[in-house]
Image (tube, rainbow, N blue to C red):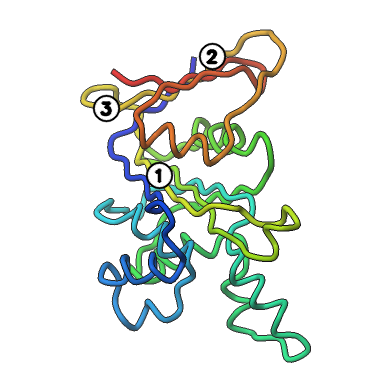
Amino acid sequence: MTERFVRSLRVELPFPGETVVEARTRLADRFPRTALRRMTHLGLLVGAALDGMALELNDAVVYASTFAEARALEDYLLSFPLASPSLFQTSIHPSAPQQVLIGRQQPICRLWPHAGGPRLVEQALLTLMVEPAARVALVGGEEQGTWLAEHNAASPVSFAFAAMTTREASGALCRVAFTPAPGADRACPSLEEFARSLSERRALSWQGAGGSWAVEWP
């Protein structure tokens, strides 16, 4: 069995009916005004999830997002034929955690960005389990797209989460465990489902990657 323990956790879910503009207004006070202008919607959500979670030089970050900066990508594509360099810069996949780390001027030892579909959560958790750093932040999220969402190329909802994990069980909020075992893969939770389960402190279990997964709360 391989396991990690969540020491601190924050999940950023939108209020019912909240627009991107309303969310930006709500979160604006958490960021320096000079940084705010350059931050994407997902960057703000990830930054809010990481708010109060101190990262150190020897820490690692595992980041998961299927579509990442969909709004920036939409705006970048619409800027053609005069393509915007700044929109291109913010539309790259790991932009959200990089915005936060650069804003904090915070170096870390490693950043592992993951993109994927049905088994994205599993991909990120596998990296979490094998990363040698004593402290690893598991971060994920999506931002709500507009016309790209109509083509299944962006998320229909916005959310973000950040969980600081260690290998110390004492005082942990929850445990993430992988046990090698034979068996057919069972549906892996989506990134949104995983985020909501963390918010609700709800247990999860499934089969995949040659073993069984469990997220367990006291």
Do callouts 2 and 1 mark residues in contact (Cβ within 8 Å)?
no
Residue linked to disc 3: 172
The residue where tag 1 is placed is: 137
- Residue pointed to by mark 2: 179
Say whether disc 1 or disc 3 marks the residue closer to the N-terminus.
1
Depth check: give the residue in front, 75 or 51: 75
Q: Residue furthest right?
A: 81
* Left or right placement of residue 181 versus residue 37 in this view: right
Give the vertical position of 112 relative to 82 (above or below). above
First-in-chain label (2 vs 3) = 3
> Disc 1 residue type?
Ala
Which amino acid, mark 3? Answer: Ala
Tell me if residue 27 comes above or below residue 211 in the rendering: below
| Distance (Cα) linking label 2 and label 3 | 19 Å
Label 2 is placed on what type of residue?
Thr
What is the CA distance from the residue labelled 2 to the residue labelled 1?
A: 21 Å
In-front residue for pair 20/69? 20
Task: Out of 15 and 96, give the one closest to the viewer.
Answer: 15
- Identity of the residue drawn at 75% across and 85% down: 80
Residue 211: quarter of image: top right
Q: Secondary structure at mark 1?
A: strand
Residue at 60% of width from left, 79% of height from top? 87
- Of all residues shown, which one is farthest toward the top? 182
Residue 200: percent from left, percent from top: 36, 32
| Callouts 1 and 3 close, C-beta under 8 Å | no
Whether residue 197 sits left or right of residue 217 in the image: it is right
Q: Residues within 10 Å of mark 3 (few under 14, many from 20)?
A: some
Q: Is residue 121 left or right of residue 138?
A: right
Residue farthest bottom in this picture = 82
